[in-house]
Each structure stands twice: as structure tokens, then as C-alpha cells.
Amino acid sequence: MTKTELDMQISLLMQGTEYGDETLKQAMAQELRTRLLEVEQEGRKLRVYCGFDPRTSDLHLGHTVPMRKMRQFQELGHEVTFVIGRFTSLIGDPSDKDSIRAQITLEEATLNAETYAEQAFKILDPNRTRIAYNDTWLSELTFQDLIKLASNFTFQQFLTRDAFRKRWEAEDPIYLHEFFYALMQGYDAYHLKTDVQIGGTDQLFNIVTAARKLMEVLGERPNIAIIHGILPGTDGVVKMSKSLGNHIPLQTDPEDMYGKVMSVPDIAMSSYFRLVTSLTPTEIDEIEGGLESGEFHPRDVKMRLAREIVGIYHGEDVVDKAEAAFRRVFQEREDPEEMPDLLISHGLALVDVMVEAGLTKSKGEARRLIDQRGVRLDGVVIENPEEILELDEPKVLRVGKRRFLRLLPPEE
């Protein structure tokens, strides 16, 4: 590898990284440079991994940020492992949580993980991706092994983490098993003999402190941390998360994906362009400059963003249709041309219909939406949470901004 080729790889792989500390960033870049030269001499490629916990069945747009970085490594010929964290899911990463996460079972995690590889291949090359499940090695550890791993860290180290510190100061409970998460993730890196581990800024402790130290203690060279920014959710502020309801699922349809992107606040558009589109830094700089000067209207820029994202995950051939659906529903205030039908009988409670159709998760949620004037029947706001449906002709039920259902009366 020539110096120019090496410099190009370093520049590409460090592009978009965030460490919150320039010294740390430069140290990681230098380690990456050294490791690339070492593996070339050894006649192999970098071993790169990132883990994804199947706490739910959906991967969302936030998950694609590390996957896009993994794809860059793939295209440079390096070995990429997509780790499905069925065992780490039993705890759930406490890094950005201000309260304990609900525990799930291994059976639930296994069920959630069934389509993870399929979803990941929207970004990753399936022919160059190794899929691994961390329960296959973490479940083999003994209690003696856990003692050995835990002896490398102090209680004080964990309390320096922002999430734990806030809970400590507020006298909210911090459970012992939550500390295991960083040890488990660090052991993943050791088991895989990882050269590079990818994660968001919320993973700095897990990767830089825990994984690097454990690898060194257990006789492996410390991994190199490639740390990327965090994609905000559709609220534009908090990290994208299904549990917070501010996520954009990869498995959603093109029209819903387009609409959800259009709901992102203007202030977050730059993060979306930089983290989840294929535009070059120069192109994004031009967009930001046009917004700042007033040359570009924020609505038009956001529509370009929505087109870019829908095109990546559903193909360019459906972008126009998704955009037309958005214009019809949100700009022209018309119902979408296509929506599911539901045949109902007389005398059904509206909240029961909403739950049965999957428009809400519970009757309580349905009632709250009605109280918030978020439910319409043929354009008329429903105000009574106890509304009973008596239909003699088809009517369109609209829940929130993007959920539509055509209700059909019973056949006489």
C-alpha cells in the first residue's frame, strides 16, 4: 500500500467521526494507520465489528449510521462482522438511559433478531458480511470468568458515566447487573480478536475504556475505536429510539418513511444529511450554505433529504410515488389513494377498532389520541373517547398524521 493509498483510507474511515476530544481522535487515527500497515505485513485485512442488540424486532435509521461505516470498511476489502447481541439484550445498554431498562428473555431476543440480517443487508454487502450471535460465546463464561473480568474495573469508573452519575446524584437505583453490559461488550471485542470496533458517541466508555482494557488484559492488542455521531430522532433532539417513538424503521413503507423524514425539525437536517445519506461533504456544505443564505427553502431541502433516504432503502423507482403521496395528504389535505380496508359490524367502539387494526397499541393510547383531537372520521374530529361506530357507507379513519384506514359497513 502506497502512502497515498494509506492516507486515502485513513481520511475516508475517519470521516464523520466524533470523539469529543481531539487528542483521542488523533490517537485513534494514528493507531488505525499503524494497524493497517501491520495487517498488510501479516497478509490479512482488518477485523471490524459492530454489535446490534435485538431489544425490538426493527432496525431503524439510527442503526444505519454504524452500518454505513462498516460498508466503507467492506469496500476497502476488510473483514466485517455484524454481531447480533442476543445476550447483551438481556441487560440492554444503559449508556444513555436515566432509568433501568426492562429485562427481556433470550427467547424474546432470538425472536426479535430473526430479520436483523435481512434488514442489515439494505446497507451491508451480504456476500462480505459475517453474522455472529454473542450468546454463543458469552453464555459459556463461568462465574469465575466474570470475577476475573470485573476485577479490572472500579465502581468509581462506572460512576463517571453521565447516565449513572445522574441517577446516583438523584438517589435513583442503579442495579449491579447494569455494570455487566460494558464487560460483555468488551468480551465480544476480545472473542472476535477485533482490530476495529464501531459505535456512537454513547459507546465511548464501552469501547475505549472497557473493550480496549479487557483486550489488553486478556493478551490481545486493544481495538481501535471508530466513534460516529448520534442520529437524532424525528423530534430532532433525543437519540433515535423505538422506545421513545421517534424512530424511522427500515421496514416501513416508502410513503411512511418519506412522511417521517419530512416531520424532522429543520435544525436536525444537517445531521441527517451527514449521517444517513450518500451525499459528499462538499454537496452537504453547499446545501447548508444555501439554507444559511436563503437561496434554498428549508421545505425544498427537506424534500430532497426525504427523496435521498427513501431512494436508498426502497429504490429510486418509488421515490416519486412516495413524494406524491406526501403532497396529497399533507399539502393538499387529501386522503391517500391506497389504504387498508376493515369490515366492521354495527355497534363497535371506536377505540376497539383502532386497537384491532393496529393503529394504536392499547385502548388507553386510543383514548389519549382522541382527547388530543388526533382522530378524524371522514375529516371530522372525533371528540368522544367512547364513540360507537354505526356506518351505512364507507368512511376513512385517520389517526395522527400518517395512519389511515377505510372502514366498511357490514353487508346487509
Image (cartoon, grey):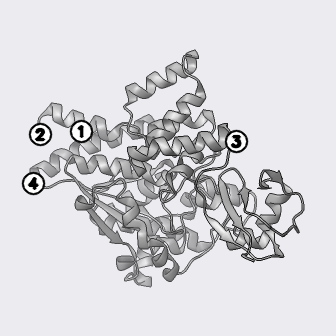
From the image, tell me which residue sits under label 2.
1
Could you tell me if the residues under marks 1 and 2 are in contact, i.e. CB atoms within 8 Å?
Answer: yes
Which is nearer the eye, 311 or 115? Answer: 311
Relative side of 143 to 30, left or right: right
Mark 2–mark 4 Cα distance, whole angstroms, equals 12 Å
Q: Point out which mark residue 333 bears.
A: 3
The CA distance from mark 1 to mark 2 is 10 Å
Going by the picture, which residue comes out furthest to the front?
Answer: 412
Q: Earlier in the sequence, mark 1 or mark 3?
A: 1
The type of residue carrying mark 1 is Gln
Q: Which residue sits at x=76%, y=64%?
A: 393
Query: Is residue 25 placed above or below 182 in the rendered structure?
Result: above
Kind of residue at disc 3? Arg
For this rendering, which residue is in front, 48 or 377? Answer: 377
Residue 122: % across, % down = 37, 55
Give whichever of discs 1 and 2 has the lower sequence position: 2
Q: Secondary structure at mark 3?
A: loop
Question: Pointer 4: residues within 10 angstroms few (<14), some, or many (20+)?
Answer: few
Whichever of callouts 1 and 4 sits on the residue coming sooner in the sequence is 1
Quarter-of-image position of residue 390: bottom right
Q: Which residue is mark 4?
A: 43
- Alpha-carbon span between mark 1 and mark 4: 17 Å
Side of 224 relative to 167 (left or right): left
Q: CA distance from mark 1 to mark 3?
A: 49 Å
Q: Residues within 10 Å of mark 3 (few under 14, many from 20)?
A: few
Q: Amino acid at mark 4?
A: Gly
Q: Could you tell me if residue 98 is visible in this image?
A: no
Residue 306's place in the image compared with 190, above or below, is above
Location of mark 1 (residue) = 9
- Residue 340 placement (x, y as % from top left): 61, 63
Left or right: 255 in relation to 27: right
